[in-house]
Amino acid sequence: MAARTAITRVQTIVILVILIIGVIAAAYIATLPSSNTTSSSSTSSSTSSVTSSSSSSPSSSLSSSVSSSSTSASSSSVSSSSSTTSSSSSVSTSQTTQTSSPTVSTLSIDSWIWPGVDLNLLWAPTGSNWPLWMAYTVNQPLVQVNITAQNQGNLQYLPGLAENWTVSSDGTAYTFNLRQGINFSDGNPFNSYQVWAEMYGYYYLLANDSNWLYGYPNLFNYSQVRFGPSTLALMNQSGVTNPNAQLLKIMENSSWPIYVTGPYSIVFKLENPFIWFPGTLTVYAGLIFDTQYVLDHGGFGTPTSYNPYFNQNPIPGTGPYVITQVSELSYVKFQQNPNYWGNSLTQQQIAEFPYLDPGHAKTVIVYYKQDDVTRYSDLQSNGAQIVTIQQPEWNLVTSNPSLAYYQLPQISDDVSILGLNTHMYPTNITAVRQAIVHAVNYSQIYAQADLGKPAPYVGPVAPIFSDLYDLGGYQPYQYNLTEAVQILQQAHINPSSFPPLEFRIVSGCFACSTIAQDVQGELSAINMTVNVVVQTPALFNSYLGAYTSELLNPSSIGNIAFPYDSVGWGPFAPTPVDNPISFVSNTSLFGNSAIYYNPTVQTCVDSMTSTSNISAIQAVCKPAQAQIYNDAPYIWIGQITLWGQAGGSLVWSKNVVSGFQVDGEWSGESIDPIFNTVTFASGYTG
């Protein structure tokens, strides 16, 4: 009897355990997303096809599966490996990131550059506020890239604050369905009205220019739009979180290119099909901020005077961190957001959407420290856990086995180029530019500037966009002094009669200085004198900007110049049209340091935002590629494989940091780690 009673109790306990497990499992399954696939466009080089549920719960609506297509560059996966030139480790951090990590009190990061226009997101469409330390950490995008796939050479677009999107049958209307139940860190709700107000605020600040979105041509038709001071006054009167009837009528006006169809649904109506459109919302203008906060603190400003209040008082976002302190040109302090909507994400969801990670440090401080030795000393003393080490001290990294550094995949869109001013003598002469691109020793530049393994390319489109890269199969420009001299002789040009060529660089960029000295020495071999002019970042960037403004004063840029204040260039957005628009288009808002324009080339650029027919784009872009190659408006130095943007890379101690993610725009948005993704080595307590 006693034995039977014991067995009965065991059976009872087992049954209870099974029942409990069943209840837990059922509850877990209920939180998983459904597998409804949205209608979207996809190409062989990018995709916006995603799987997500329509649940109103912001965390449970994340998809556990993503439908995507990959590029032909899928063989470019990056693995963690020992450097062949040093005892430190060169790694792709996405492969070292772990799904669980110790939580530490403080993470400190030393950056080598302070953001332009401080932390003011109103400048986002122009890229003037690079590097954006708030990207993903404070302000999250509507769409995000699949960083894990991208590090393997595949470009994919995934849901961000938009839980999914659909595309009309003609490819011109993108309807983004937004996550519900999310608030900005100041408590204001995130909804389609906020997004609408932000988009038209950008349009207004850029002087109602229909190409306001990074200069992309032919995207929107604003002919029916009347947005100005009176609309802004109505927004102030009504508020945008819950607009009154008069403002709501404007927001729902479908004759405007951006309009709402409900509190959590917003439509972007394009003039023509643009299959990479979701990629424009992964960055800069796609980073969502609390527009009501903007209105409550003086508004947007005017096209000639953006509201400077937000330089030091950043606009709240929906992300895992909030900014608590800004010390100009010194540091920015971030604290974890206790009300972050993603705090309940599962480890599986974080693994699939790493940019949504709530973070593993309660406090993050990003310091601005210009000196390489200081940053290295901070790393050695654990005063900072991740730092940028540039070219002068790079040997300290490569000789230290306790350190690891970040290296890009061979196929990316992080490139180094030099503009040859097509509107300043003598680089306005085609033969002179052709001679220059053959007088440059590319291998020597890579070696001396510490840009990583040489990865030559033919610009402007990056190799990751294989369908549109190097149409015509041209060979990257080769170092050949004999050919350079012959080009000049055949054009009856005597370079010894030239005035000195001005090569303008920014102070503090050691790799810029190294490259300038290399070019200076190499061009002397073909009797060209080069004067290197060093300028402060503020002065250097003040001369660069939109193609139209550069055209007014071309001599201010000099004969030779990087397109920005570093040796590297990452795109505004992960689309194949971004580099052509930035470098060779008259709609460029930034990056065209050659001040280059050609009608054949512009036809190609325009086609990229005017049709979904890849074959049609290739047909007009193939002659454009030939035109650019012959005109030689740029020295296409090559793809950067180290991350530092000024030579060198991000560096950390293996005993402290186990991994992190970087900017999915190949440093076009930020050069420092996306710090909410930083994970720490087991046993590290901070």
Image (tube, rainbow, N blue to C red):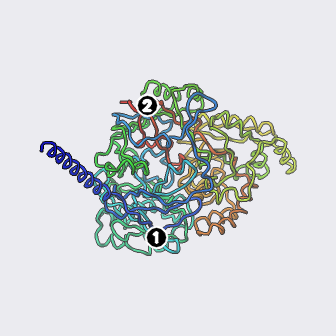
Q: Do labels 2 and 1 touch, CB within 8 Å?
A: no
Could you tell me which residue is drawn at 59 percent across and 43 percent down?
568
Say few, some or many: other residues with alpha carbon within 10 Å of mark 1 (under 14 / 14 to 19 / 20 or more): some
Taking depth in this image into account, of 337 and 241 the one nearest to the observer is 337
Quick check: can you spot residue 623? Answer: yes
Quick check: can you spot residue 295? Answer: no
Question: Where does the image place residue 374, in percent across and percent down from the top left?
Answer: 49, 26
Which residue lies most toward the front here? 1
Q: Earlier in the sequence, mark 2 or mark 1?
A: 1
Question: Where does the image place residue 389, in percent across and percent down from the top left?
Answer: 54, 32
Q: Name the amino acid type tagged 1.
A: Pro
Say few, some or many: other residues with alpha carbon within 10 Å of mark 2 (under 14 / 14 to 19 / 20 or more): many
Q: Is residue 169 left or right of residue 461?
A: left
Taking depth in this image into account, of 12 and 154 the one nearest to the observer is 12
Tell me the residue that label 1 is attached to: 257
Disc 2 to disc 1, C-alpha distance: 49 Å
Could you tell me which residue is drawn at 78 percent across and 43 percent down?
498
Is label 2 in a helix, a strand or a loop? loop
Quadrant, the C terminus: top left
Q: Disc number at residue 656?
A: 2
Label total for image: 2
Which residue lies most toward the left here? 1
Question: Where does the image place residue 38, in percent across and percent down from the top left?
Answer: 44, 67
Could you tell me which residue is drawn at 35 percent across and 60 percent down?
179
Q: Is residue 635 left or right of residue 196?
A: right
Q: Name the amino acid type tagged 2.
A: Val
Question: Where does the image place residue 532, in percent across and percent down from the top left?
Answer: 67, 37
Is label 1 in a helix, a strand or a loop? loop
Taking depth in this image into account, of 538 and 592 the one nearest to the observer is 592
Quadrant, the N terminus: top left
Taking depth in this image into account, of 494 and 266 the one nearest to the observer is 266
Against 624, residue 653 (above or below) is above
